[in-house]
Image: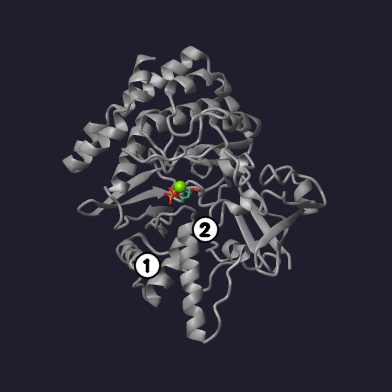
Amino acid sequence: MSIHVEVELPGGGQARAGDLDMHLNRGGALVGCTFRYDAAYLRDPRAYALCPELPLTPGNIPSGSDRPLFGVLADCQPDQWGRTLLFHAERRAARAEGRKFMTLTEVDFLLGVQDETRLGSLRFSLDDGRTFLGPPRAEVPDLVELPSLTDAADAVAQHRETDQDVRLLVAAGTSMGGARPKVTVRDSVGDLWMAKLPESSDRWDVQAWEYLTLRLASNAGIEVPVARLHRIGPARSILLTRRFDRRPVFQGPRADLQRSEDASWGGSGGRIGFLSADSLTQKAFFEVIDYRTLAETLADHSGRPATDGHDLFRRVAFTLLVRNVDDHMKNHGFLRRADGWSLSPLFDVNPNPFAVVESTPLRPGGNRIDREVRVLLATADSYGLRRDDARRVLGEVAAATSGWTRIAREMSLPPEEIALMAEAFENPNGDEARAA
Ligand SMILES: Nc1ncnc2c1ncn2[C@@H]1O[C@H](COP(=O)(O)OP(=O)(O)O)[C@@H](O)[C@H]1O
Ligand SMILES: [Mg+2]
């Protein structure tokens, strides 16, 4: 059975992009898939290739052996957190109906998330676009339901969830990737927000520090999503960021609406195409992509390669300076513009005082644990930057990140957490960047 795939185009308006077939083996594992662009889509002057694995050509396009699902589709599947919720929901449904638990497959993970909140600009249908697939009876909750959603997520973490908890979370929490508990909620205007929830295993107020880091990034000249922090208890906060893969509904005089004024993003309330860096680079499962390669790949796919290259350099510098170690290809994203793929606002950048994690190296074969500003500077030309411009950017980023204690005090973060985070923010890369 073919899945009808619709896409919302950068200038606004929906089009049938084509048909998808997913091939499962008898055990239910995905072994590959095939996509065919619709003939009318191929003739449409607004059409774009949905991801690098799907060039605009007629006929069947098979997936590669390293990547059984095309990137743009994998990007709108849930990850660890959303999949856990779908497993809980299936287990409960099976029990209630007195039947065996069904093995959930990649097809379920693609089609079982809510249509309205699905990441990016794709929608799926089995009846030729009359209805779009998602879980039954799933309503996007309002912002005011955040306390019950947070309680429900706590219940799941502590293995004491009820049917009601699972129902609430499946409706709200399966559309985004990542491992951390999160939900999508709607504000009173109608805009969607992603809410990252606290976890009882957090060793510090992770979401408050992520919010602080977004403020530092913005001061460092990096585009960040519109963000809010809800403090809900001692060392417990919820981070809300407005969904950057949706055009804001509210068109009033708000300082944060630059994107909606940019005609290449189309009208209000619509969906914007999203691709992760994983998909842009067509990364194979065990492959390590380095930043120099990412910069060069982005230059091939962006409609404004100079701007995107410079912006990426600034983000890498920032990542080193705040000791963001959970740094991998799913934590960079691109939004579709009429002229190509461009960096999305920043997300999931977290200061870490001590974790040793294999992160994205700065150049092919580079060190994944001790990443040095010196090496980044040596690769500046891959980002289209002259050495002195790169030095200037490093100085600007270092000046911005050195404001971390001021913001932490302004936010009344606990002194013991501020002392701990000094290990993240006061690192040798900062001194080197200032010296540059
Ligand atoms: N404001 C946002 N709007 C739209 N998509 C987002 C936003 N923030 C994050 N995402 C998407 O959601 C995914 C999960 O968010 P992330 O912050 O990375 O969570 P986690 O900490 O669990 O990895 C990201 O990989 C990205 O694709
Ligand atoms: Mg992430």
Q: Which of the 4 image quarters holds residue 183?
A: bottom left
On screen, 93 above or below 128?
A: below
Q: Between disc 1 and disc 2, whose residue precedes?
A: 2
Q: Residues within 10 Å of mark 2 (few under 14, many from 20)?
A: many
Residue kind at label 1, given as amino acid type: Val
Please provide percent x and percent y for residue 411: 22, 41
- Is residue 418 in view from this perspective? yes
Cα distance between the residues tagged 1 and 2: 17 Å
Residue kind at label 2, given as amino acid type: Pro
On screen, 324 above or below 245?
A: above
- Provide the secondary structure element on which disc 2 rests: loop
Q: Which of the 4 image quarters holds residue 303?
A: top right
**Which residue in the protein does label 1 denote?**
156
Residue farthest to the top?
388
Q: Residue at x 56, y 54 (%)?
A: 76
- Whether disc 1's CB lies below 8 Å from ligand 1 is answered no
Residue 43 relative to residue 412: left or right: right
Q: Quadrant of the C terminus?
A: top left
Residue 154 relative to residue 377: left or right: left
Out of 310 and 331, give the one closest to the viewer.
Answer: 331
Please provide percent x and percent y for residue 5: 68, 58
Q: Residue at x 50, y 59 (%)?
A: 175
Please provide percent x and percent y for residue 386: 53, 14
Out of 116 and 254, give the one closest to the viewer.
Answer: 116
Please provide percent x and percent y for residue 93: 50, 79
**Which residue in the protein does label 2 denote?**
78
